[in-house]
Every structure is written in structure tokens, then in C-alpha cells.
Image: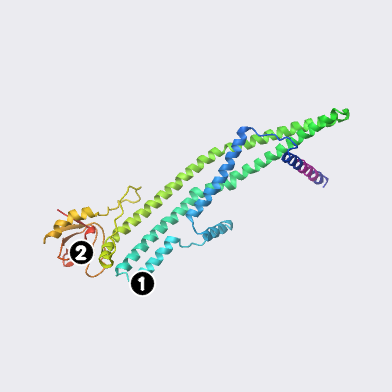
Amino acid sequence: MDFNVKKLAADAGTFLSRAVQFTEEKLGQAEKTELDAHLENLLAKAESTKVWTEKIMKQTEVLLQPNPNARIEEFVYEKLERKAPSRLNNQEQLAQYLIDAGNDFGPGTAYGNALIKCGETQRRIGGAHRELVQTGAINFLTPLRNFIEGDYKTISKERKLLQNKRLDLDAAKTRLKKGRVAEARASMWTEEVKRSEQELRITQSEFDRQAEITRLLLEGISSTHAHHLRCMNDFVEAQMTYFAECYQYMLDLQKQLGSFPSTFVSNNNQSSLTPMQSVPLPSISASAPLPAASNSVVTSGFSELKATSGSRKARVLYDYDAANSSELSLLADEVITVYSMPGMDSDWLVGERVNQKGKVPITYLELLN
């Protein structure tokens, strides 16, 4: 019991001494031991790393999960160490609406069929985004959070200890200075000065030791930067994969809807859509995407056929689902006979196979020699 009382009294005395020293420094009534320039630079670098890491981490979370309520829910479940319930993301929710609408309007209609195809594509994009969120959380956000909640907390603890040791050192310097002034007036203070000198040596040693510990921790910030750089590279690769997959999905969807723009032009006087230009992207599947046919290719390949009454063989470039009974469904790589009839739309031909016949879009065909 006596030991605890003495310890509490000593701690209270130390706290009071530090508080007095800190106050006098702020009032300009006491000198302050300055840290060396190298240590000050390391402290500034660590603080800057902490601030920017928090900002990058927060904004990445917003990027991956734009819904603030969903972020709060995920945070609560994480703190409770429970798995958050699975919910549809924005793309998957849109996909469900599109598919439901397409089924309601009728999969056999042009609009219903297009809605279903768009919905299926949005569902794939939603799955790709879900994978991006998971990969980004594991490979990028988790290392950043580990630094804030682990390494930087340790640095902050040692930095606070260093601050306390500095206050103890400067308080000892102040007491020694006052003791020497009194010693000059009366020899009875000699013993007090000796105790102050011994205290100064001890506090100086403790301060130097704590400064070295803090310096070693702070020098690890460079390794932290290197680790975060590798994590950022992983996140960039995940984004590249995600955007490449989205591009591939949308390119496939555009091919499937290739005939719709020309149909809408004839019915609603809307301007035709220009196919997306193919650009180099990282390979994400074994088969490369088929290029969308341009107007120049179509004109040069089919203008002669439309000007004559003859027929030609043509290879189907990719699948096509007939929108109504006047059209002919196509399968990729099959060969059919095509010819033109008077009054037909410039984007269409008549296609025949065995005993089947119907209109086919020329953008889905390649004439054979």
C-alpha cells in the first residue's frame, strides 16, 4: 500500500513538473531543447504520410462504395466482427429492372429483347465491380488501414514518450540553473546542485535513448512508402482488369444490338449510332472481340450487290436474334445466300438458308468471293 502511494505521489510530481515546464515554454519563460534537423524531418514525413494515407483511404472507400449508408453498415459489421448481408450493387439492381421490364414487354419484341440483353450485360458488369471492390479492399485498403491503426499508433506512442522525456530534461535543466544561482549566494545549496546535476545526466540519457528509438521507427516510413507503392500497383491492375472486362461486355452488347439503330432510324427518324472504335486493351479472354463493321466497309462490299439482281454467299460474323417474323435469325460463322430486293432499306438484305428466308442486317455479314 505504501509503495502504491509513493508511486502515485511520484507520478503526480512528474506530471506537475512537465505541466509547469510546458506552460513556461509556451509563455516564453523557459528554454526548450530542440530536436536535431534529421529527426524533425522524419517526424514531418511521418505526419504527412499519415494525413495523406487517411485521405486516400477514405476517398478509395467512396470510389468503391458510393453509398454512404452502405459504408456505415459495412463499418459497423466489421467492428462487430460479423459478415455484412449480401446486397445487390447499383449495376446489379439496374440489371434486375432491365430484365424484369424486358420480360414484361415480351422477349420476342425488339425492345423487350434489347432490355434483357442490356440487363444481362449490366449484371456481368456488376459482378466485375463486386470483384474490384473485394480485390481493392484486400490488396489496397487493408494495408493502408494497417499502417494507420498499427505502425502509426506505435510511432505516436513513442513520439509522445519523446516529448515527455524532453520536458523532463528541460525541467532538470531549469532546476539546475536555479540551483547554481542560489549556490552563488549561499554554500548550503551545494548538495542540491549535485542532485540536480545527477538528475540532468539521467534525464539526458533517457531523452537520448528515446530519441534513438523514435528515429529508428520513423526511418521505417520509407519502407512503408515502398509497400504502399506495391499495393497501389495491385489496385491499378485490378482496375485495368475491371475496365477491360466492362469494355468487352459493352462491345459484345453493341454487336448484339447492331441492327437496332437502323430500325429506329426508319421508324422514329432518329440519327444512326456510330459503332465504337476498337482500341487496344489487355487481353481478358481467349477469343479476341470481333471488330464492328464501319460504313465504308459496308458500302464497298454490298453496293454492287444492291445494284444488281444477283445473289452472293455471305458468312455470318456473329449471332443475331430476329426481332420479328420478317427477319431471319443468324448463327455466327454459318454461310447463307443473300440478295437485295427493290425498295429495301439500305442496311438490310434478304437472307436464305435451305427453306428459310428473311431480312438480315448487312453489318452482321461478310461477303464471300
Give the amino acid type for the residue marked by disc 1 in the picture. Asp
Give the amino acid type for the residue marked by disc 2 in the picture. Asp
- Category of crowding for the residue at label 2, using alpha-carbon neighbours closer than 10 angstroms: few (below 14), some (14–19), many (at least 20): some
Write the residue at 24% across / 64% down.
Answer: 329
Residue 279 position, x and y percent, is 32, 49
Write the residue at 64% across / 36% down.
Answer: 213
- Category of crowding for the residue at label 1, using alpha-carbon neighbours closer than 10 angstroms: few (below 14), some (14–19), many (at least 20): few
Q: Foreground: 114 or 330?
A: 114
- Circles 2, 1 touching at the beta carbon (< 8 Å): no
Q: Is residue 12 magenta?
A: yes
Question: In which quarter of the view is residue 312 placed?
Answer: bottom left
Residue 227 position, x and y percent, is 51, 41
Q: Which residue is mark 2?
A: 345
Q: Which residue is mark 1?
A: 104
Q: CA distance from mark 2 to mark 1?
A: 30 Å
Residue 83 in sight in this render:
no
